[in-house]
């Protein structure tokens, strides 16, 4: 019997991945760039156990047993076995996998990225796989390849037909821009949403704007945002981030039939951030939205108290602070009358934002050394 437990972080793209040139190998139409969230606050945790006594492969996700016969999971397993150290008997044994997120899956935060990154990282430990594993995580879910490393990460689209050059690499470490904070505003929304996989398949088939983006926009944006991050040039970073999010959502509308991930609360948040940036005459906050209505705001640590006070002013809530604020604690600040007077956005109905999660940029996937942290007991059953 052999067992390992790992954690892997969520990542948030500032240059979006949207569209595949190869569905089986999960090869993207363009490079993408992301920040890795601190694993302490938002992460997947996965225990993998292998034993010659296990009759079949089994997997439990967030407390529920799921089928192992998932093509993406099997694809990752096949690759991991091919890359395993020769003579390692463990690869012939069945495995039990138990995985959980410490944030609500329903919050629409990138759970599949953290989940697949963690699964691949953990099995790679068990099989003593050496070298790059981001290309294997990519086959679970494209964005998962960016959750293996910490700091600021680039997923290179690659050009080879077999996808072997479509990997993710770190270009700035965790310690590079320590003032950066990310606020996730979790928005109430009960609509059924299209999964990223389905949405991007449809965009790839029908949106000419997506083709234009991949052919003529992203390459330059990637170079410019990497430079901005390396130089800690918040203004350029913020403008590119917001434009890229807007372009992704414009592509969703250009898809036929169209779909929309943003709702009216998301749109009000966008207006609010632009009004706030206008007040200062320079971008202080950058928003970005994935395949859902929740806003992700990038800003510097010193600006967090005022921005949070502004959000609470426009989006009132009855929720107690212990429930409303998650992650890194937020210091209270009163809003200046001048700022209140200049922000021309009406106070919204109560409860439109469920809670705010503050995090910073963190390290990538890691092994958890404490044996008490295993999610499976000695018989390979969830604890
Ligand atoms: C909007 O990685 O979830 O979050 O590769 O089909 O599993 P699949 O898609 P997924 O797509 C993520 C799309 C996005 C943008 C991004 O993270 O770059």
Image (tube, grey):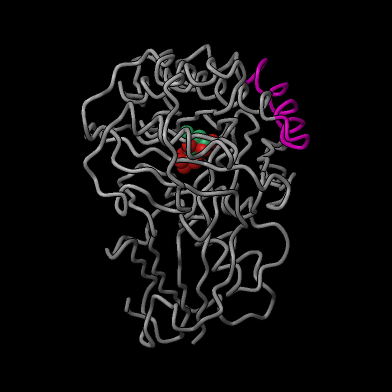
Specify whether 282 is left or right of 315. Answer: right
Check residue 59 for magenta coloring.
no
**Can you say which quadrant of the picture contains the C terminus?**
bottom left
* Above or below: residue 315 compared with residue 70: above
The front one of 186 and 82 is 186
Check residue 230 for magenta coloring.
yes
The magenta-colored residue range is: 214-233
Residue 178 location, x and y as percent?
A: 66, 48
Specify whether 210 is left or right of 111. Answer: right
Residue drawn 44% across and 76% down? 94
Residue 40 location, x and y as percent?
A: 50, 61
Could you tell me what secondary structure mostly forms the magenta stretch? helix
Question: Does residue 23 show up?
Answer: no
* Above or below: residue 82 compared with residue 75: below
Residue 59 location, x and y as percent?
A: 36, 66
Residue drawn 31% across and 35% down? 187
* Above or below: residue 68 compared with residue 162: below
* Above or below: residue 340 compared with residue 376: above
């Amino acid at each position: 019997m052999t067992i390992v437990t790992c954690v892997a972080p969520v990542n948030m793209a500032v240059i979006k991945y949207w569209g595949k040139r190869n569905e089986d190998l999960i090869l993207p139409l363009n490079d993408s760039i992301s920040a890795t969230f601190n694993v302490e606050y938002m992460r997947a945790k996965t225990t993998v156990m292998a034993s010659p006594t296990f009759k079949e492969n089994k997997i439990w996700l967030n407390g529920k047993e799921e089928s192992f016969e998932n093509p993406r999971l099997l694809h990752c397993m096949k690759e991991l076995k091919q890359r395993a150290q020769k003579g390692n008997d463990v690869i012939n044994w069945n495995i039990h996998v138990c995985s959980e997120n410490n944030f609500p899956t329903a919050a629409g935060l990138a759970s599949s990225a953290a989940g697949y990154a963690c699964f691949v990282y953990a099995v790679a430990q068990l099989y003593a796989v050496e070298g790059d594993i981001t290309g294997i995580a990519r086959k679970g879910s494209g964005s998962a390849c960016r959750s293996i490393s910490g700091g600021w990460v680039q997923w290179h689209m690659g050009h080879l037909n077999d996808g072997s050059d479509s990997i993710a690499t770190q270009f700035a470490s965790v310690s590079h821009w320590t003032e950066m904070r990310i606020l996730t505003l979790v928005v109430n929304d009960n609509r059924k949403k299209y999964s990223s996989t389905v949405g991007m398949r449809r965009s790839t088939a029908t949106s000419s704007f997506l083709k234009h983006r991949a052919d003529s926009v992203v390459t330059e944006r990637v170079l410019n945002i990497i430079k901005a991050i390396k130089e800690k040039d918040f203004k350029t970073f913020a403008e590119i981030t917001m434009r890229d999010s807007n372009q992704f959502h414009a592509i969703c509308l250009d898809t036929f039939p169209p779909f929309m991930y943003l709702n009216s609360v998301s749109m009000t948040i966008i207006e609010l951030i632009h009004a706030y940036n206008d007040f200062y005459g320079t971008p202080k906050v950058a928003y970005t939205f994935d395949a859902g209505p929740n806003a992700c705001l990038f800003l510097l640590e010193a600006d967090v108290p005022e921005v949070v006070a502004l959000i609470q002013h426009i989006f009132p809530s009855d929720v107690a602070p212990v429930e409303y604020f998650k992650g890194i604690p937020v210091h209270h600040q009163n809003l200046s009358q001048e700022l209140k007077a200049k922000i021309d956005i009406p106070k919204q109905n109560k409860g439109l934002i469920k809670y705010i999660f503050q995090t910073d940029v963190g390290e990538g996937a890691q092994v958890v050394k404490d044996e008490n942290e295993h999610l499976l007991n000695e018989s390979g059953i969830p604890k």
